[in-house]
Amino acid sequence: MITSMERLRAAVNGTPADRIPVFCNLLDQGAKELGLDLESYYTSGEHVAEAQLRMLRKYGHDNVWSLFYVGKEAELLGCKQILFASEGPPNVLDFVIRTLEDIDALEVPERLEEHPAFTEQTRCFEILRHEIGGTVPICSYISSSMTIPAMLMGMERWLELLLLGPVEKRDLLIAKCHEFFVREVQACRAAGADIIVYANPFGSTDFVPMNIFTSLSLPWIIRDIQAIGPAGVVYYCGMARMNDVIATVREQTGLGAYYVSPLDDLAEAKQMIGTQGLTCGVINDIRLIEWTPDEIRQEVKRMMATGMPGGHFLFGTGVMPYCIPEANIRTMLDAAYEYGQWLH
Amino acid sequence: MIDRVLTAFNEAIFDTDRERALRVIREAEQEGIPPEDIVFKVVVPSIHIMMKSTSERRTPSIAQHFVAAQIASEVTETMVSRFARSPEIIGRVVIGTSVGDMHGLGKRIVSGCLKALMIEVIDLGLNVPAERFVDEAVAQNADVIGVSSMMVHTARGPSAALGVRKILKDRALERRIKLAVGGAPYRFDHDLYRTVGADAWAEDGIIAGTVISALIKEARQ
C-alpha cells in the first residue's frame, strides 16, 4: 500500500499514485481529541504527538505537525507570557521588543535544541519519528526573517519600523531574526522535519506593495532560502495571496512548492507553477464552519477539477479553525479522497 | 495648484514614502494653501482615491493603507490646530480589538483614516471586553462601536461582537449605537458580520471610513 510520503513524492515528481496528497492542518483540535483544555494540551510534546497520531488514524490525511502554536517562536526569543484561549490559537501577550534599544539587546539562542521552550517540541518529534517517520510527512512551520519581528514587537509597531525606520534598527532586527530562522530550521530538520512551511505574509503583495516586495522582502527571501536550501520547503504567505510573486520567487530562489491562498485564482497559480513544481490548492476553511455538506463537496470538486489536470497538485487546508464541526472535516476529507483519485 | 499637490501627495502615499508625503504638505503650506484646503482638498480626497482603488480591485496593500492612515492622521491633527474655525466633528466612534485579540494594526489604520474624515476616535486598545465597548460608547456618547478581530475565535466568540450586540439589545441602545466589525476572518466569509450581529463590516481599514461614516448617519437619523 502506498504511503503518504510516497504519495507526496509522486505529486512532486509527477509520477503515478492512487490519489493526490491531502494535507489537513489540525492543531488546536488535538486538545479536543485528548479531552484537554488548550493550555494544558500545549504543555507537553507527548500530548501534541499523541493527538497528531490519533487524528491521522481518525481522518487518514497525509501529514502531521510538529507545530504547537506560532507564538512558540517568540518564546524561544524570550517571550514570557502567552495568552491562551478556550477555542483558538494562543496569542503572544508579552512583547520582547518594547523599545528600539531592545533590538540591540535581543539575543538569538546558540543551540535551540537545548532551549527549554524547544524541549517539548523535541519530544513531539521523537514520538512522531518513531511512529510514522518516513511514511507520513512531518511538517514544521517556520516564520520568515521578516515575519518573526511581528511576534516580538506586535505587527503594528513592526510595520511602523519596517516602513518608517530607523532603517539601521530595522535591518539589525531582520538580520537577527534571519539568524534565528536558520537555526530553527536546522533544529527542526535535525529533529525530524520533512517539510518546512516557510511562512511569510511579507512575501505577498496583499501585505506590502510590489516596490517594497522587490526592494526588501525578496532579498530577505533569497537569503532565507539560500541559507536552508529550497528542498522540502513550501512557500506560504499566511493565507494572503501570492500569484503576483510566484514567478519571481521561483526564479530567484528555486522554490518548487506553493501553498496558494484561497483568495488566489487557483487556475492561474497552477498555470504558473505547472509541472516544474507543486501547486497546493487551499480550501477556504473559515467557510467550512457553516458550509452544508453539499457546498463542501462542490467546493472540493471545483478545486480538484482546477488543480489536478497535469498532476503536481496537493489539496490542503489553512490552519483549521477550532470550531469547524467534525462532520464537516470528514465531509471535506471524504470529498478530497474521492475527487482526488487518479483513474488509471 | 491644489490638483498638483493632491497628485504628488497621493503618489508618495502609494509609494509608502512618508518623508516625501510630508514634504509635499510643507511645500503646499509655503505656497500659501490654507490648512483647511490641505485637509479637505488633499488629505481627504487621497483617502477617497485609495478607497476607489480598493473597490476597483487594484487593491492597495496593508502597508499602503497603514502609511496612508498614519500620514492622514498626522497631517490632519497638525492642520486642524491651524484652522480659522474648529471643524465640525461628524461623529464619534469607540474602537478596539475583541477579547483575546492582541492584533492592533487594523484598528490603527481605521483610526487614522477616521480622524482625517473628522470622526472622533476613542481607542480602547487591545483585548477589550464587550461590556467595556458599550460602557465607553455610552459614556462618550459615541455613534458607532468598532470591533476588530484577527482570528476566527476572537471574531466569533461570545464576548466579541456577539456580546456587544447582546448588551446593546438588553439596554435598548441598538437604534442609537451601531456596530461595525473588521479583520481577517471577515475577508474569508463575507456573511460572518451578520452571524456576529454587526450592522456592517469593512474589507479593510480604508473602506472602514466609508462604512462607519454611513453608520454614523444612520445612528443620527
Image (cartoon, grey):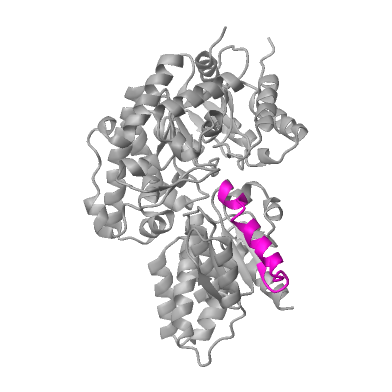
- Kindly identify the residue that appears in the image at 31 percent across and 40 percent down: A76
Q: Is residue B11 visible?
A: no
Is residue B77 depicted above or below A137 in this figure? below
Question: Percent position (x, y) of residue A188?
Answer: 35, 28
Q: Is residue A228 left or right of residue B56?
A: left
Q: Is residue B158 left or right of residue A339?
A: left
Q: Is residue B155 visible?
A: yes
Is residue A63 depicted above or below B116 in this figure? above
Q: Is residue B210 left or right of residue B205?
A: right
Q: Residue furthest top?
A: A1
Q: Residue furthest bottom?
A: B84
Placement of the N terminus of chain A among the 4 image quadrants: top right
Q: Is residue B160 magenta?
A: yes
Question: Percent position (x, y) of residue A12?
Answer: 51, 20
Is residue A238 depicted above or below A166 in this figure? above
Placement of the C terminus of chain A among the 4 image quadrants: top right
Q: Is residue B144 left or right of residue B20?
A: right
Q: Is residue B187 magenta?
A: no
Q: Residue furthest right?
A: A294
B175 or A277: nearer the eye?
Answer: B175
Question: Percent position (x, y) of residue A18?
Answer: 62, 12
Residues in magenta? Answer: B153-178
B67 or B193: nearer the eye?
Answer: B193
- Kindly identify the residue that appears in the image at 31 percent across and 52 percent down: A96
Numbered marks: total: 0
